[in-house]
Image (cartoon, rainbow, N blue to C red):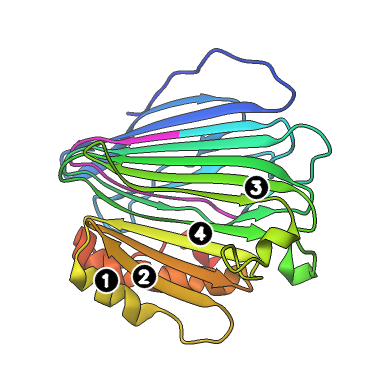
Amino acid sequence: MTKTRPFNQNTGTGWQARLELGFARRGPRSVLAYRRQRGPLCVQRPFYPEGGTCHLYLLHPPGGVVGGDRLEFEVHCEAGAEALITTPGASKFYRSAGPGAVQTQTLRVASDGALEWLPQENIFFPGARVGLHARIEIEAGGRFLGWEIHCLGRPANREPFSAGQLNARLELYALGIPLLLERLRIEDDRDLGLAAGLRGFPVAATLLATPADGVHLDLARACLPETSQGFSGATLVDGLLVVRHLSPSTEQARRAQVRVWSALRPTLLGREPCPPRIWAT
């Protein structure tokens, strides 16, 4: 049974929300063992479309993030637990003329646990001011397969990220050792065009998989799209597979990420691809 324990309420200029989830193995199934929440962050009931793996959808009822909002996610996948987490739609970060919005994610995978973190894209409207920090911690024997997709501006509406700020940090640690530490800083559309930046593409996607080897690298590279509309690449360093896409659209980037995820899942996690039903709606 899920245990719900609320945090103390905080006040601020925007929504101050926090959601903490813990998954544990109970017999043949992985279950949502505890949930602590504050503010407008919640989850739907768990789904089990493939047996013992727990599928869960994160919800943010306000429908978007505005200046002054602070959202915190913390996920703990205990020993032997297997969970897949996604979102029903894109996360939208709206224009702010004043304070910025902050979103932090801390994902922990214990020994022999497996976590798939597969949210739909983040859309940063022109004028948004956002700080993102994602930290992934993996213990011995833990497995992780996840992605993040960032869309700067609204390319479908021909609205570039002409003003605003994005400061995004992505960190992955295995056994306390940093395998990936990176930062993406965008001030306006000038940074989007830099050769050392996003090369003029509004969408940047990153997929991480560990523990990985040469087999996983070959599988990922075989899935990379052959198109002149964007750039893709895959690298393997110290057991961490990193797959990146620069794309003109979120649809193209998402399709590429799903192809790689589908190819990696059987060998990395021992499970055939089972796309969440929400992706088809």
Residue 153 is at least partly visible in this image: no
- Which mark sits nearer the N-terminus, 4 or 2? 2
Looking at marks 3 and 4 on the same chain, the residue that comes earlier in the sequence is marked by: 3
Against 232, residue 68 (above or below) is: above
Q: Looking at the image, is mark 3 or mark 2 earlier in the sequence?
A: 3
Provide the secondary structure element on which disc 3 rests: strand
Q: Which residue is under mark 1?
A: 217
Disc 4/disc 2 C-alpha distance (Å): 27 Å
Is 238 situated above or below 57? below
Which residue is at 66% across, 70% downward?
200
Residues at marks 3 and 2, CA–CA distance in whole angstroms:
24 Å
**Label 3 sits on what residue type?**
Leu
The residue lying toward the viewer, choosing from 179 and 73, is 179
Residue type marked 4: Ile
The residue under label 3 is 166
Q: Say the numbered circle drawn on residue 278.
A: 4
- Amino acid at dot 2: Ala
Tag 2 residue = 234
